[in-house]
Image (tube, helix red, strand yellow):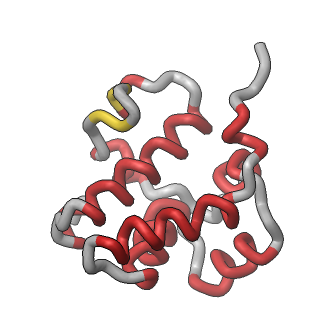
Amino acid sequence: MTKHRIYSVSIASVYPHYVAKAEKRGRTKADVDEIICWLTGHTQETLDNQLANDTKFEDFFAHAPQMNPSRSLITGVICGVRVEDIQEPTMQEIRYLDKLIDELANGKAMAKILRK
């Protein structure tokens, strides 16, 4: 089975779209960074390094410092697929991030986005 094309895309190429989506709805780059750090365990410094190094999505999630155990609480539909039903682990991590960014852009409170 061939890997999905998104795995070889750098997170740095998609990151500006996450930020633009958030800012369009009155949120900030700092909010996007907080979500990514919460999900992956990255610090702001290590996140910045990953972006600067053009890390591919597959490697970004495979080498994340500490994936947040509360990510299993993320449910809902993204791109017509329920995130909790995605079987492939890397694709599920990517879709978790997409879902969190959507929630941010839709005005959900940060505490709820971060499943506190």
Quarter holding residue 50: bottom right
Residue 64, quarter of picture: bottom right
Q: Residue at x 36, y 43 (%)?
A: 72
Q: Is residue 83 left or right of residue 4?
A: left
The one nearer the camera, 75 or 27, is 27
Instruction: Give coordinates of residue 34: x percent, y percent.
Output: 42, 76
**Compared to 75, does 12 lie above or below?**
below
- Closer-to-camera residue (44/56): 56
Instruction: Describe residue 51's horizontal placement relative to residue 91 as left or right.
Output: right
Q: Quadrant of the N terminus?
A: top right
Residue 92 x/y as whole percent:
50, 36
User: Position of 100 compared to 17: left or right?
Assistant: left
**Residue at 36% in and 49% down:** 99
Q: Is residue 105 left or right of residue 85?
A: left
* Residue situated furthest right in the rendering: 53
Q: Is residue 36 above or below residue 28?
A: above
Who's the residue at 57% across and 35% down the image?
Answer: 91
> Is 16 located above or below residue 98 in the figure?
below
Number of numbered callouts drawn: 0
Q: Position of residue 80 (x, y in %)?
A: 35, 27
Work out which residue is located at the far front of the displayed protein and give it.
24
Q: Using the image as rendered, state which of residue 93 and residue 63 is in the foreground.
A: 93
Residue drawn at the location 69% of the way across and 66% of the way down: 12
Q: Position of residue 18 (x, y in %)?
A: 48, 64
- In this orientation, which residue lies closer to the viewer: 66 or 89? 89
